[in-house]
Image: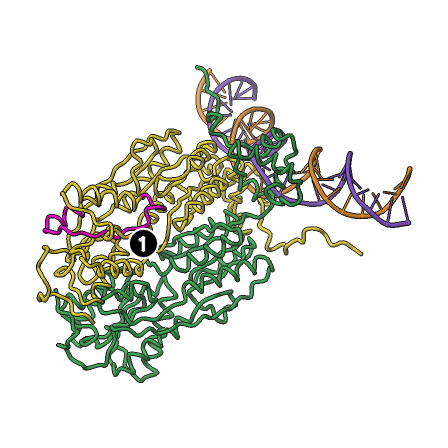
Chain colours: A yellow, B green, C orange, D purple
Amino acid sequence: MVTAPRRTRRPASARPATIREVAKEAGVSTATVSRVFNDPETVKPSMRARVMKVIDRHHYVSDGLAGGLASRRSRLIGLIIPTMTNSIYASSTQAIQNVAQKAGYTVLVGISDFIPEQEAHLIHQLIGRRVEGLILTGAERPPRVYEKLRRNGTPFVITWKLARGSGLPCVSFDNHRAAATAVAHLVSLGHRRIGLICGETAVNDRARGRREGFLAAMSKHGLPIDPSLLLERKFEFVEGRAAMHRMLRNPRPPTAVFCANDIQAIGALSECREQGLCVPADISIVGFDDLPIAQYTTPRLTTVRVPASDMGRRAAEALLHSMRAGEQDIYVELPTELIVRESTAREGMGSGLAFCLPAV
Amino acid sequence: MVTAPRRTRRPASARPATIREVAKEAGVSTATVSRVFNDPETVKPSMRARVMKVIDRHHYVSDGLAGGLASRRSRLIGLIIPTMTNSIYASSTQAIQNVAQKAGYTVLVGISDFIPEQEAHLIHQLIGRRVEGLILTGAERPPRVYEKLRRNGTPFVITWKLARGSGLPCVSFDNHRAAATAVAHLVSLGHRRIGLICGETAVNDRARGRREGFLAAMSKHGLPIDPSLLLERKFEFVEGRAAMHRMLRNPRPPTAVFCANDIQAIGALSECREQGLCVPADISIVGFDDLPIAQYTTPRLTTVRVPASDMGRRAAEALLHSMRAGEQDIYVELPTELIVRESTAREGMGSGLAFCLPAV
DNA sequence: CCGATCCATGTAACCGGTTACATTATCGGG
DNA sequence: CCCGATAATGTAACCGGTTACATGGATCGG
């Protein structure tokens, strides 16, 4: 039996051209071709033109793997976010992409789905891709992960969570304080029985920060905390809805609910409407994030605006700087802002007001 | 003056370990270490354990650039989408990520922002990263781009647009037909004066498909087309709002509007409410995409459900298959579905109905 | 007990760029 | 017209993995 050649060659047209082929055809050395890309000023215009012609003719695209390996610069930065279904991450991601692109970097995005093991795996993968820097979401992960980052010399920065005291580089706002602001707003409107709907604190230190901010604010204002009014759900509309459903079946339902993110808040809003309750007359709702959609709900959502885009931009800038400078002491705290719209009102206004929505 | 060494070395702890270091310390050859990763069954368990110990101790992470170069397999697939702010792309992206991950691939996402040059640039970049396959949005791009893909042997698949007749591989639904369905629904409710709000057809062949579907359906039903009722805007809530504002200031406003995406539809909805109009009593609105949020608007949005997640999954699967098989004839058409909710009603019902929302 | 076979491992060429350094053109001044 | 400086280009050793092939040891049937 005749053995076929081991590696079946693709048709020539589909095998990308190499720098040596280009160099040969242009009658120059590979170094010159390389310089045409990386240091165009150092090659004489006439020669540059000659090389460019060959490049264009062959649709030559320089191999980033080889280039990255040789130069020890992948021109890649990594980003890990927990989910794509919450559009708040779209804002920060967009901002990061912008900064990165301007600096000549490509962004590798990993989605962890709130699963710590998945996140650790993604970090490993991205280190393997030799990203020159990494933007992480949240600060909580096993020490071995941080150790791996350190040993592989990958600079990183944490977002969405202030990593106070830990010495970890971070660019974020204060989840704790922001949540407290929301509670303070509700208290100032006379609410005393306030519920909380938030993400799963076991796998989400941002949600935990907000929860703790909520609890701290409650006790600061001398309000009792009813554990049956503390609900944790996944980041989905339906989950927010289900949580609110539960909240309303409580023998003593709350007069206001703080939702630690807008997605759940909008689900909650919809559940109230379904139950024939008027927001804000019967019950007040505060969200968190200030998604674009928050201005378009009925009623418009009172929420905590989070500097997602700014945070992304500054995190990326800080990361690029730390990549160049080699030092990692980044600590940036960004402000949040309570946006009061229509979903919150004085406690005890009762139902039947003119602007109360009828159940459909 | 004393010259410093050219390349300042990072501290040893931050220089990632190499396979040769690991091999040496474990007392084996680099081939064995490599096999521990890529072909674990072929190395004796005792040896594997010995190597793994060294790997763990050093937090060794194999260099994907070098590996990709040597094996000619980057284990990367590329995805280009126009924007992150429309969450419909999150669904398809998520699905793609899932399939890719299961097959051992990482997804490189590029955002084109609806700018053709930007898209061409991203495609070039991704080819350069030696993605083994590429998932594109829409079919329209200069021939040189397709030529570049061909010459570099990068398989690809087009999504969000059926590339009929062009012979280009695609997995999509039919924008044209889906839009026509929406119009048919409105016509069946007695509407004759129907407006269109859609994306910018000049840079978006999906929007163009929907627009053409709209026009075709209108003339099929013998309805006149008023150019002043054909509006194109960017994909933003505010843009949909502004478009509807314009629509309503028309001397003869439409009784129904088809919005070629939900984002703009929700903006339009909000503008109607602002103007004291009742949807659907005064004016009907149909969206397109069926974003999760469409169930939570007031009124709930009638819209065309698009198989985003399915499409992403099938596109990724088809791409992986075509990467292996080396052939590129993919043509998959997925169904869409009109989801009738509350934002559409019979024409001429007039205002003042019980469930009409008062302006706030 | 020997050669064929198979399994586990080692050797080293190679992937396609980059870049330090060497070499050759170019140019201005004496 | 020659010399030294400078600009432009070439040479070839890497970068850190992979893998075809070689090698050596164990197994086994005859």
Number of on-image labels: 1
Given residues B230 and A29, the one toward you in this image is: B230
Q: Considering the numbered disc 1 on the image, is that residue within a helix, a strand or a loop?
A: loop
Please say whether residue A53 is visible from this viewpoint: no
Given residues B264 and B210, the one toward you in this image is: B264
Looking at this view, name the residue that lies furthest to the front: A251
Q: Position of residue A262 (x, y in %)?
A: 25, 54
Report the side of A288 relative to A321 (left or right): left
Quarter of the rendering occupied by the C terminus of chain A:
bottom left
Given residues B353 and B318, the one toward you in this image is: B353
Q: Position of residue A276 (x, y in %)?
A: 18, 67
Please say whether residue B309 is one of the residues in the magenta stretch. Answer: no
Report the side of B147 relative to B89 (left or right): right
> Toward which corner of the image does residue A336 lie, by quadrant?
top left
Please say whether residue B342 is visible from this viewpoint: yes
The magenta stretch is A183-205
* Chain to which the residue tagged by mark 1 belongs: A
